[in-house]
Amino acid sequence: VTAKQVEDLAGRLEGLTATEAESIQEGANMLLTFKNIQNEGGKTGGIFDQTVVAATDMARAMGTDVKSASMMLGKALNDPATGLSKLSRAGVTFTEQQQEQIKAMANAGDTAGAQALMLAELNAQFGGSGEAYASTYAGQMELVGHAVGALGETIMQAAMPALLWLAENGAKAFNWLAENQAVLGVVAGVIGGALVAAFVAWTASVWASTVALLANPMTW
């Protein structure tokens, strides 16, 4: 499972479930710590991907966050033989036949098969919860908010090099001025003198214009 794969999966699920992609990524990163939850042969759509989807739906249905749901599923799916009891305590029910079948497959070394059966039941109980929420007014508003946030992130990423350059060089300029106060005083004096001279010249030109205007017979 690559970082790009997790990012793409989270982005796709955000559009389907109105659950923030960053939250889904946190849950996926949590699942990565459970070494028995894998995508067979590195293929997308494997056990890992299915577990991320299940955690997203489960979080929406149970009113929790994806990271917490991922922790719960991670503990249960990492060792299916003992994980059924963990899900049962969380309110996920399995028939006796399902429990026996899952334990038999896990004890026979078919961990992925046991996980697939558990995920099928999780999907039967919680599947579609995220998509159902996304179709509501609240879900649509969240999707709009996520889109605006993504646009802001894109703009900031584009502007960041210029902002970093400005911050770095601005700090250098202020530090230089602080260390060379004598130069700062001379510069301020030159600027101040130039402004005073400009103001005097402007005032004189106004008076000259006024005198010329009053001297004109047409004014009278």
Image (spheres, helix red, strand yellow):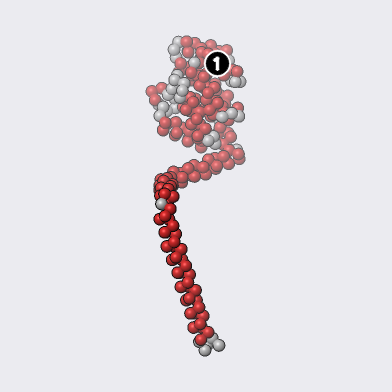
Looking at this rendering, what residue extends furthest in the left direction? Answer: 41
Q: Position of residue 77 (x, y in %)?
A: 50, 19
What kind of element bears circle 1? helix
* Residue plotted at (44% across, 61% down): 189
Using the image as rendered, state which of residue 86 and residue 113 is in the foreground: 86
Q: 181 above or below 193? A: above
In the rendered picture of this protein, how many numbered marks are placed on residues? 1
* Residue on which disc 1 sits: 84
Residue type at mark 1 is Leu
Using the image as rendered, state which of residue 132 and residue 197 is in the foreground: 197
Q: 210 above or below 194? A: below
Q: Quadrant of residue 123?
A: top right
Q: Quadrant of the N terminus?
A: top left
Residue 30 is at least partly visible in this image: yes
* Residue plotted at (52% across, 89% down): 217
Residue 174 is at least partly visible in this image: no
Q: Position of residue 166 (x, y in %)?
A: 42, 48
Using the image as rendered, state which of residue 34 and residue 14 is in the foreground: 34
Q: Quadrant of the C terminus?
A: bottom right
Q: 85 above or below 56? A: above
Q: Position of residue 76 (x, y in %)?
A: 52, 18
* Residue plotted at (53% across, 84% down): 214
